Amino acid sequence: NAGVMQNPRHLVRRRGQEARLRCSPMKGHSHVYWYRQLPEEGLKFMVYLQKENIIDESGMPKERFSAEFPKEGPSILRIQQVVRGDSAAYFCASSPIANSNQPQHFGDGTRLSIL
Amino acid sequence: GESVGLHLPTLSVQEGDNSIINCAYSNSASDYFIWYKQESGKGPQFIIDIRSNMDKRQGQRVTVLLNKTVKHLSLQIAATQPGDSAVYFCAENGGNNRKLIWGLGTSLAVNP
């Protein structure tokens, strides 16, 4: 009974490169959420997607960041032209339905380091 | 032991003691609250949740208390074990299902 799967677990990029982070939700879950965490801080919401739709991207920077959740395949968080400030842990969560009373289940994150 | 989590404080308890972790939430519209446990290098793990129409909910060794009047949430862990050592976060839904709003977390250290 696989949980939320994220890969890669660690990603190193040089400034100006692109970073692609992947997330496969739990089986049966069609709602995906991306969060960012800096050391010793709580998670900060970035974007909420359903299959083929972005529902809420209010927490995502307007430039360089994009997210998708295609009909087939994992959800992708893409960061273009990375800068040092993008270094963080990025977590993906999923839930079965859009219900306020359902907990989100998290993957183990991707640690992004920018050289 | 007891702690208020606003700056990632550390709560240190002896094995077998009860722990109380506190959280002040921010949004009056929040109607769903969750406690997560995060171990080093891992993602948040769901512990227990509570809806705003309740003021107490119990799980296995854990109890969550909700005081909507003062917007306060607490997590009680009974008979704390070394495996409970982690950072604990409270999260609120801000009145909708689209995102969770997270506190800063409290680090729990259990001394054997």
Image (spheres, rainbow, N blue to C red):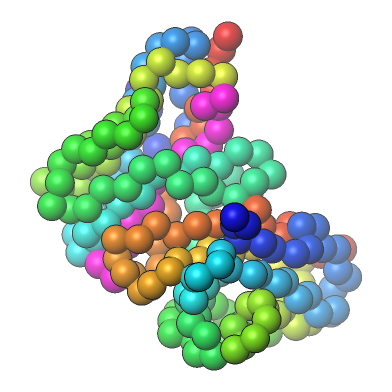
In the image as oriented, which residue stretches furthest toward the front?
Answer: A1
Classify residue B35 by image quadrant: top left
Q: Residue at x 33, y 56 (%)?
A: B92
Is A56 in the magenta? no
Q: Quadrant of the N terminus of chain B?
A: top left
Residue A48 to residue B50: above or below: below
Q: Does residue A115 appear in this view? A: yes
Is B94 in the magenta? yes
Q: Which of the two residues, B76 or A19, is positioned nearer the viewer here?
A: B76
Q: Residue at x 61, y 88 (%)?
A: A70
Q: Does residue A35 appear in this view? A: no
User: Residue A44, position in %: x, y?
Assistant: 50, 62
Q: Quadrant of the C terminus of chain B?
A: top right
Q: Residue at x 46, y 24 (%)?
A: B11
User: Residue A8, position in %: x, y?
Assistant: 78, 63
Residue A21 to residue B57: above or below: below
Looking at the rendering, the stretch of residues picked out in magenta corresponds to B83-96
Relative placement, left or right, of A100 versus A36 is left
Relative placement, left or right, of A47 versus A39 is left
Q: Which of the two residues, A83 or A23, is positioned nearer the viewer here?
A: A23
Residue A79 to residue B71: above or below: below
Relative placement, left or right, of A38 versus B10 is right
User: Residue A39, position in %: x, y?
Assistant: 63, 48
User: Residue A87, position in %: x, y?
Assistant: 72, 62
Q: Which of the two residues, A5 or B7, is positioned nearer the viewer here?
A: A5
Classify residue A3 by image quadrant: bottom right
